[in-house]
Image (cartoon, rainbow, N blue to C red):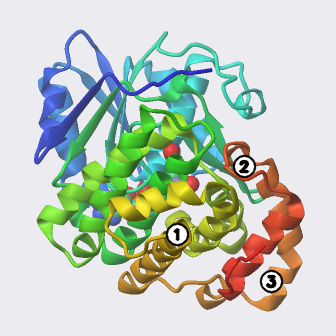
Amino acid sequence: MARFTLPRDIYYGPGAIDELKQLKGYKKAIIVTGGSSMKRGGFLQKTEDALKAAGLEVKLFEGVEPDPSIETVYAGAKAMREFEPDVIVAIGGGSPIDAAKAMWVFYEYPDLTFDDIKDPFSMPKLRQKAIFVAIPSTSGTASEVTAFSVITDYSTHIKYPLADFEITPDIAILDMDIPLTMPKKLTAHTGMDALTHAIEAYVATARSDFSDPLALKAISDIFDSLVDSYNGSVEARGKMHVAQCLAGMAFSNALLGIAHSLAHKTGAAFGIPHGCCNAILLPSVIQFNSKVCMERYAQIARAVGLPGYTDKQLTDSLVEAVRAFNKKLDIAPTYKENGVTEEQFNELADSIAENAVKDPCTASNPRPTSVEEMKKVLTCAFTGENVNF
Ligand code: NDP
Ligand code: MN
């Protein structure tokens, strides 16, 4: 299938939340958010006020946890069925936005179960009851423009990436004031998540002439602004907020690769944040995939001005540049240095590798990956050794 799908509207800039005042023709909005960060920053109140100014009745669904569970999704869907909103507004990091997307599905189709929608592109037609507005507060997942929602089944410790253009939001609002409140560590992790999205999208099997320029522009803007953003530059925070969104537009359509397959499984198993897992995995995955798409990595390296003449030298430079990012962002570069013990690793590595091969992101990785190879890549990310097979 050749298809390229994005939200219809993207509003951006400082104070962009106020655009909600322009919503016309709707009656009731439910706001879905996380713990307390959006309330603390005053952004929840601002969202509520803007919706009320547009004449909407407003209800809140608060408390979506990081890496949202199936149970939270069902609880939110129930609240929606009771309130019957025609607008769903998700404000926060990837977690509340992803949770709200899945709630939307079960709100519109109460008889479905999680099992019915976990295969990619198996969702029924949405927008029968409500439209979806997403306001991201982190600069990483780009859930505000993507066809994905990652929900964790805590009984099996597995993250399920739901995927369907039906859950691509209708409106994304990038309010540059919001990422300014991110603590440093969150800025680092979500920024490396965005870099991984753009690099994986640039080499993924479903990449296209539409996704390539978005991915490359995202990579070069992230190279220019991530470290400054981490160190608190207001301008760089704004640039990262846009760059992560460009990366999202690319990967929502080009799909991802095995850094994400492994991040989805190791995040839940080792309790390490999603972006941090990607930061650890990315150098090993570039090395593994370079056997089949070295010229693509070389193009990236050239685009951001890294040193080297041959494709091999340029790819090595890209790996070194990613490692240098981890260093400048104070991200420990291996699972081992992130507190995973040998014992823990040996106990879980086989099942992680098996589950990662089954992750939908593996299908779009440029190099087909067996369970054995997946385990070897994972092992290199555990120890920090180079991948040379
Ligand atoms: P989360 O939404 O999980 O938020 C992490 C923490 O950051 C929370 O404690 C949250 O607090 C806090 N926080 C969020 N924004 C701010 C802010 N502006 N200022 C201060 N604190 C803030 O983080 P991510 O955005 O990294 O989302 C990760 C999730 O997204 C994972 O589940 C991952 O699997 C998924 N994901 C989804 C993708 C997609 O395409 N849909 C792609 C990649 C990852 P509080 O709860 O109080 O708001
Ligand atoms: Mn990600």
The residue wearing badge 3 is 344
Q: Position of residue 67 (x, y in %)?
A: 57, 56
C-alpha separation, residue under disc 2 versus residue under disc 3:
24 Å
Pair 2/3: label in front: 2
Query: In this rendering, does residue 170 appear at all?
Result: yes
Residue type, mark 1 in image: Thr
Q: Secondary structure at mark 2?
A: helix
Q: Nearer the viewer, residue 95 or 361?
A: 361
**Mark with earlier residue (2, 1):** 1
Residue type, mark 3 in image: Gln
C-alpha separation, residue under disc 1 versus residue under disc 3:
32 Å
Q: Quadrant of residue 29?
A: top left
Q: Position of residue 22 (x, y in %)?
A: 14, 21
The residue wearing badge 2 is 362
User: On the rendered image, what quadrant is the N terminus found in?
Assistant: top right
Residue at x 62% of width, y 55% of height: 293
Q: Position of residue 221 (x, y in %)?
A: 27, 58
The residue wearing badge 1 is 315
Query: In this rendering, does residue 37 appear at all?
Result: no
**Mark with earlier residue (1, 3):** 1
**Quadrant assignment for ligand 1:** bottom left
